[in-house]
Amino acid sequence: QVQLVESGGGWVQPGGSLRLSCAASGSIVSIYDMGWYRQAPGKQRELVASITSGGNTNYVESVKGRSTISRDNAKNTVYLQMNSLKPEDTAVYYCNAAVAGVRGTYSVYWGQGTQVTVSS
């Protein structure tokens, strides 16, 4: 079993910054892609950013230039640095990870979510 634990959410004024962290633990052999998704009230969950094990990144257009995803493979941790935050960034942010486990298993796991609120 694998657990993803997120931290770093909270309230921030427009133009502010937050850094989200997500640490994976458990029966992990290796982690492939890791990503951050968000879901605002009344909207579908959307991909914000993703990063491969080799460091290749992908961003949704609305956060390009304002956010940076990174990972520390030694710590099985993915980060999302968000700058110049806007009210429309308000959402619950979820991390996920594609994990190779023992006995050749492959599964995608999700964190519990962390609230990000951007308002004045």
Image (spheres, rainbow, N blue to C red):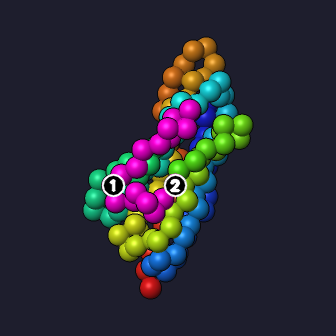
Give the alpha-carbon distance from disc 2 to disc 1, as whole Å: 13 Å
Q: Is residue 54 magenta?
A: yes
Residue, disc 2 = 68
Q: Which residues are magenta?
A: 51-68
Q: Is residue 54 above or below residue 68?
A: above
Residue labelled with disc 1: 61
Q: Position of residue 44 (x, y in %)?
A: 29, 53
Residue 66, given in percent of the width and then of the height, sits at 45, 63
Q: Nearer the viewer, residue 23 or 27?
A: 23
Q: Position of residue 50 (x, y in %)?
A: 46, 43
Give me the residue at 63% from left, 19% from top. 102
Residue located at (52% from left, 75% from top): 16
94 in relation to 25, above or below: below
* First along the sequence among labels 2 and 1: 1
Q: Is residue 88 visible?
A: yes
Give the residue at the far top of this rendering. 103
